Image (cartoon, grey):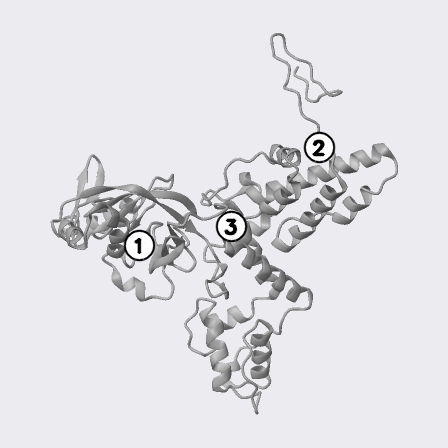
Amino acid sequence: MLATCLTGTVAAQAPGTPPPAAVEPPPRLSGQDEQAILRALTAAKDQGLPAFDVAALAAGLKAKDPAAREQADQTLVEAATRYARFQRIGGSPPARRNEAWGLAAPAYDAAADLLAAHKAGRLAAWLGDLEPQGREYKALAEQYRRYRDAASAGGWPVVPAGVQNGAKGSVVLLRQRLAAEGYAAPAAAKPARFDPGLADALKAFQARHGLAASGRVDERTLAALNVTAEDRAAQIAANLERLRWGPRVPPPNRIEVDIPSAEAVLFEAGGPTLTMKVVVGDPKHQTPMLGSQVQYVIFNPPWNVPASIASKEILPKAARDRGYLARHGYRRVNGQIRQAPGARNALGRIKFDFPNPYGVYLHDTPARALFARDRRGLSHGCVRLEQPRALAGKLLAGQSWTDDKIDKAIDAGKTRWIKLDQPAPVFILYRTAYVDADGQLNFRDDIYGWDAELNAIM
């Protein structure tokens, strides 16, 4: 029977098994190191991280007994190690994360990193460098503190239905609600009246919540107004956690797809140069979060129809209409349904291919009318682009592909795979709270329910 626990400090070794490598003892901390760690652990709560009992840790460091003092130091080192792990790979256990959350930080040995920083005499600097260094993380952490404090102070008033019709007292409540979140309307001689100044303040609120800026309190606007400050703080905390999974500093040249906003942005030299609407997966066919690199631009791609789509959608239509497959360019190839390139092809004229375990990609679409919709969670998981031709021109500009050459290749109708000399980093992100380039906080609907799922395991 195998032993299930160890006695003492060394386990019995099987014959021929080499002894375990010596484990370096935890560092002995100076007073400055201790204070630097305590400051970092105190700040953890300001970033939506799991809280540390800083008061108990500080009290332990005041112990008079040498053994108790040494134990307190070791406990502090363990807390600092845990803090480093939270900052570098996130505070949610990777094993409990949704399989669609494919954006993940690389493996990280926090204990070894801490020891190296201590040996180099830069523990305080190391602690300050642990969090993501991008502008967005710091700005979003500031907003988290603001909303957490607002929640602690009691939040904001509930806006009743019927405010648009001037229900008694409701317009005053709307003014108070908007002002509490920074959307104050100009002072009005008649505060109970829904005047143009209040409508403008409401339009600003709507624009930053991904709503049609109508200046009217429709059903979606009322729902957004009545999300509590506590729930908004939790929403921001979920987005801070997802930022900790991504690159510490985003590459200057990259493509970002934002699922809740249904928008894609190309960054060049650190700045946005092309922004477009996209169509993403619906709640039953969720577009995954991931990081990869676009390696190929494909002109006139065929579409190898996934088996699930073929069996649930295309083949039933073909069974009812014998000419359906031929009219839409479908044929059977080695037991699979394939759609030939052409005007009706579901991928349109251009596809952007990148390796990932989900089989998703970016592509053109003949269904152009979908980009006019406010809610664009409509696909089976892949990302349809509003301006694929412009993106192809940007990515291929350094490879002697002029606009005229691209247009001729597309017009020829033949499938062509163009390998990028420099693969383009691509990140598909899920951002329901973010700070834009103007420093304004924006919220989006949690269309997949991933915020609540993440907060439940934090």
Residue indicated by mark 2: 27
Q: How many marks?
A: 3
Residue indicated by mark 3: 243
**Above/below status of 184 relative to 400:** below
Extreme-bottom residue of the structure: 189
Foreground tag (1 vs 2): 2
Circle 2: residue type: Pro
Q: From the viewer's perspective, is 269 left or right of 444?
A: left
- Binning the other alpha carbons within 10 Å of mark 2 as few (below 14), some (14 to 19) or many (20 upward) gives some
Residue indicated by mark 1: 384
Picture quarter containing residue 14?
A: top right
Out of 148 and 457, give the one closest to the viewer: 148
Picture quarter containing residue 156?
A: bottom right
- Binning the other alpha carbons within 10 Å of mark 1 as few (below 14), some (14 to 19) or many (20 upward) gives many
Foreground tag (3 vs 2): 2
- Binning the other alpha carbons within 10 Å of mark 3 as few (below 14), some (14 to 19) or many (20 upward) gives many
Foreground tag (3 vs 1): 3
